[in-house]
Each structure stands twice: as C-alpha cells, then as structure tokens.
Image (cartoon, rainbow, N blue to C red):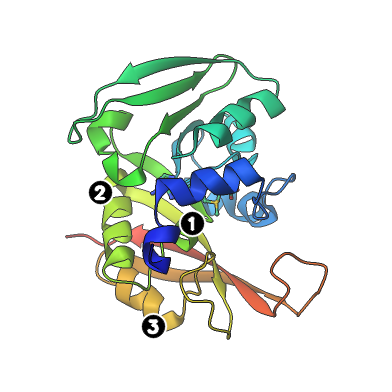
Amino acid sequence: MSEQTDSTTAEYWADRWKEGHTGWHRQEVNAYLIKYVHELTAGRPKVRVFVPLCGKSVDMLWLADQGHTVVGVEVARKAIETFFSENNLSFTVEIVKMATDNEPVDKYTCNEKAITIFCCNLFSIAEDDVGGRFDAIWDRGSLSAVAPAFDDNGKRYTKKMRSLLASDGNYMLESHYYEIDRGMRPPACISEELRNKIYGEDFIIRELEINRLEEDPNRSLSFALDLHYHLFKPKEN
Ligand SMILES: C[S@@+](CC[C@H](N)C(=O)[O-])C[C@H]1O[C@@H](n2cnc3c(N)ncnc32)[C@H](O)[C@@H]1O
C-alpha cells in the first residue's frame, strides 16, 4: 500500500481510532474558535455550522450550546459513537440515501442538542443531503487530514467546501506550517503558496492570526510549528 493510499483511506483512520492514535483530539474547546466565533457567524444567532472531519471534537458541543445547529461528517463510526458517549448524549441513527452517492449512509442525530453527524466520506456529501448550504464552516484538522499537497486533493477539497457554503457564509480554518518533510503524514503542512493555490480561485483569503509553537518534546507534534488561522469568504462567481 502506498503512503498516499494509506493516509487518505477510511481504513487508515479506522485503525487510528481503533489503536487510540488520536493525538489531535483536545479536551478543551478550541480557544481560537471562541475568540473568532463572531467573525465565523458574522454575529448572527442560530446559524448552521458545518464541522468537516469532526472526529469527537468538543467544539461541536460548544457551538450547539451557543445556539447554533451543527452538522459534522466523520468516516470512523467509533469517533462518532465515542463523541456521544463521552458527552453523555444519546442519539438516533437513520440510514439515509445520499443525493449523488449510491451508498446509503448512517445519520446520527443527537437527542439533546442540535448536532447531526453523517458517518461517511466527506466527498459523498452534497448540499441536498444536509438541508442546504451552511452559514459557517469550522475546519480544524480537516484540510490537514486529506493530504492536500498531493495530486488534486487540495483543490478537490476546497471545491467541496465552496459547494457546501452559502454565498454570504464564512469559513474558518486552523492549519499547520512547519519546515520538516513528513511526506503525507497528517497534519499537512500548508504553505502560503499551497493556501493560495487551493483557496484563491473560490475564496477571499484573510489571515486572522498565527500562533508560533517552539519545539517541545512533551507535545505530540514535538517540532517547531506555526498554527495559522484564516477566515475565507466565497468570491462572487
Ligand atoms: C485529524 S482528525 C480531526 C478531528 C477533529 N476535527 C478535531 O479537531 O478533533 C481527522 C478526522 O477525520 C476523519 N476522516 C479522515 N478522512 C475523512 C474523510 N474523507 N471523510 C470523513 N472523515 C474523514 C478521521 O477519522 C478523523 O477522525
């Protein structure tokens, strides 16, 4: 199996969940999401937020507690079911037919909060499956997980995001930049050049902030890296 096949397949991620190799997961709500949520929602209450490749992120819980409606997509069933159990939430599962993909998928609806998670590949989702385009997208560890520098993965990904975002919506991204070669291993390194190449055609790019992290042997990614925060707005086509 090539390295590329490995890190972009459902099996790769299912194995990581099975083995507990989920070093990206945080117990706390993302501080930059809290800081910039008004930019993300444009100050609007009760918006529909998409959390692609959501894992068991507690950011979903926090967004729902702010009054927003959250939709996630996650290929690993274990991640979804752990999200509900760790947060003492119950769910209902429905098998749903997708608009453009033949394979029906499991849709998990939370009984207590406005959170729905589709158990499938991100690329199987179309706007008709999720009740129309979203007002906001919160992307942490999603672009980073699809090997965006390889083949046309990056452009394919940003085109999918654009197709799911309302024309007056906002898309906030956390991405990593570092100076070592890690091949295709997530999280991907997103240079300014790659960012411009994959977002420039469809989005207006605004850099919000950079958080510089020095080398730290106690961190799961121990090398020096920068966390970049961006806000993208759809360009008028
Ligand atoms: C790096 S983790 C990030 C999780 C989450 N966003 C967070 O911040 O904790 C990437 C997640 O995406 C899932 N995943 C990877 N590729 C996927 C795809 N093509 N479609 C749906 N989920 C995918 C993995 O199972 C994993 O849980």
Query: Measuring 30% from the left and 28% from the top, which residue is drawn there?
Result: 131
At label 1, counting other C-alpha atoms closer than 10 Å, the crowd grade (few under 14, some 14-19, many 20 or more) is many
Circles 1 and 3: CB atoms closer than 8 Å: no
Residue 42 visible (yes or no): no
- Check the picture and name the quadrant holding the N terminus: bottom left
The three-letter amino acid code for the residue at tag 3 is Glu
Q: Nearer the viewer, residue 180 or 155?
A: 180
- The mark that comes first in sequence, 2 or 3, is 2
Q: Nearer the viewer, residue 56 or 213?
A: 56
Q: CA distance from mark 2 to mark 1?
A: 15 Å
Q: CA distance from mark 2 to mark 3?
A: 23 Å
Q: Furthest-bottom residue in view?
A: 179
Q: CA distance from mark 1 to mark 3?
A: 18 Å
Q: Nearer the viewer, residue 83 or 165?
A: 83
> What residue does disc 1 label?
172
Circles 2 and 3: CB atoms closer than 8 Å: no
Where 48 falls versus 23 (above or below)? Answer: above
Query: Measuring 62% from the left and 31% from the top, which residue is drawn there?
Result: 83
At label 2, counting other C-alpha atoms closer than 10 Å, the crowd grade (few under 14, some 14-19, many 20 or more) is some
- The mark that comes first in sequence, 2 or 1, is 2
> What residue does disc 2 label?
163
Nearest to the eye among marks 1 and 3: give it.
3
**Where does residue 208 sit, x and y in percent of width and height?**
55, 68
The three-letter amino acid code for the residue at tag 2 is Ser
